[in-house]
Amino acid sequence: MKKIIIILLLSGLFLSCKKTYQVIMPDTSSWDLFKTPVALPLIQITRSAMEGVYDIPEGKDIFGELVAIKWSYVINNGDTTFHISGFFGKDIAYFICEGKQLNGSILMNGYWRKMVSTETGIMRLTIDPTDGASVLLTAAPLITSGSITINGKFGNGQEEPQIPITLKYKRPLNKSPAPFQIAAHRSGGRTSDLLPVSENSVAMILKTQEFGSTGVEIDIRFTRDGVPILFHDNTLNLRVIQKCGLVGPIENYTYEQLSTFVRLTHGEKIPTLREALNAVVYQTSLSFVWLDTKYTSSIKPVQALQKEFIQKAAAQGRGLDIVIGLPGKDQFNQFLALPDYTTTPALCELSIEDVEKINAKIWAPRFTEGTQNDKVAVVHAQGRRAFVWTVDVPEFITRFVNEGHFDGILSNFPSCVAFNYYVHE
């Protein structure tokens, strides 16, 4: 007993001394110039012309030598909000801003973040008329190397931006081969990576394009009463949820119990698969969804929702692929039990022979097997695609983009994949 008490005391001491890391997102609302009523939204042609690869003459010591800039949007309550994101080449850093035009200039207001640390802060950027805004704001912008210069300042935490940064347009974004999928793991990244929203949440689905994602992987489990939901882990635990008193396998609880008592780390409810797919179709421009089956029972309920939302996307004029992921033999055998399995879009993580057997659209090997360009060529010759998962080390991401022939990369750091893909020549 004495030994047990000592162990408990030491454990309590360790836990009390353990440092808690968090990222406090900066409040970006203090720039009065950006909030003035005469500052107007940017039109589509201006936003498109701004996209590209930029040199970083000033600020490269913090963010690297290049940044890839791209716009995205999200629809909430019928209102469309556009964000400009910059993906840097150092420390998996990025910035996310809103943009407006004012008196012939272009203003961008938001924040920057480094994924390798808790570093973040406010970022404010400007394109003056003589630095390219006068061209960007025309009806037919003609953009050439050096024709756009973005000047700005950034700060640390909530402090007012004081550190200068300069970005100069270099060339268009790489878009070959197309469509290349930048697929975000757990719909955008792990909760443990200190993101502002929780993994596998609707909020993450609505934010993931700001991180560079063109598609998402989401984890499917079932509640006790048969409702398909998004949740990665086998059990309810404090890695992904707030303390609530419920423990054990998520399959032990009904959807009503989970909806009533459980909140994800940032306060969101565990979403149903229907809610998640509804957000993808009607609120984003995502073009790919990977339904990762984390259970071993029937595939039919997931297949029914897959069919329904493929049809809904088509009715919206959307080019959206929704594939059922098969990570193991149990899921593979359940898929074989479907009467129409050969025409059901699937992604198979097993052998190429298994891919052929079920006529899967995508073969998805683990990154530890390497680029496997010979096998990827076989898959391509069959009219299929090949993705690789889950690639998080920046050096590995660079290698797979530059040396591999995959059609997509799954990562917890889509901003890093986006940088490497868009700057690739």
Image (cartoon, helix red, strand yellow):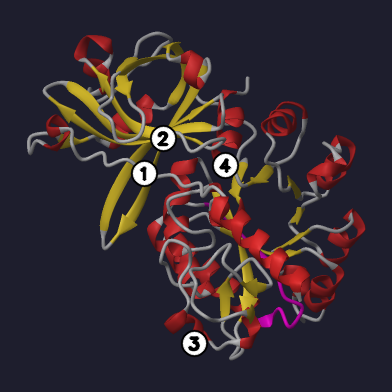
Label 2: few (<14), some or many (≥20) within 10 Å?
many
Which of the two discs, 1 and 4, labels the residue nearer the N terminus?
A: 1
> With respect to residue 417, does 338 lie above or below?
below
Q: Which residue is mark 1?
A: 25
Direction right: furthest residue: 353
Which of the two discs, 4 and 3, labels the residue nearer the N terminus?
A: 3
Q: Which residue is mark 3?
A: 257
Residue range (magenta): 287-300
Which of the two discs, 1 and 2, labels the residue nearer the N terminus?
A: 1
Residues at circles 1 and 2 in contact by the CB criterion of under 8 Å: yes
Front-most of residues 174 and 66:
66
Q: Disc 4 marks which amino acid?
A: Pro
Q: Which residue is mark 4?
A: 414
| Left or right, residue 230 beside residue 145 | right
* Image mark for residue 368: none
Q: In the image, residue 31 lies at what x, y percent?
A: 18, 33
Label 1: few (<14), some or many (≥20) within 10 Å?
some
Q: Dot 2 lies on which element?
A: strand
Q: In the image, residue 22 lies at what x, y percent?
A: 46, 47
Front-most of residues 286 and 382:
286
Give the spatial CA distance, label 3 vs label 2.
Answer: 37 Å
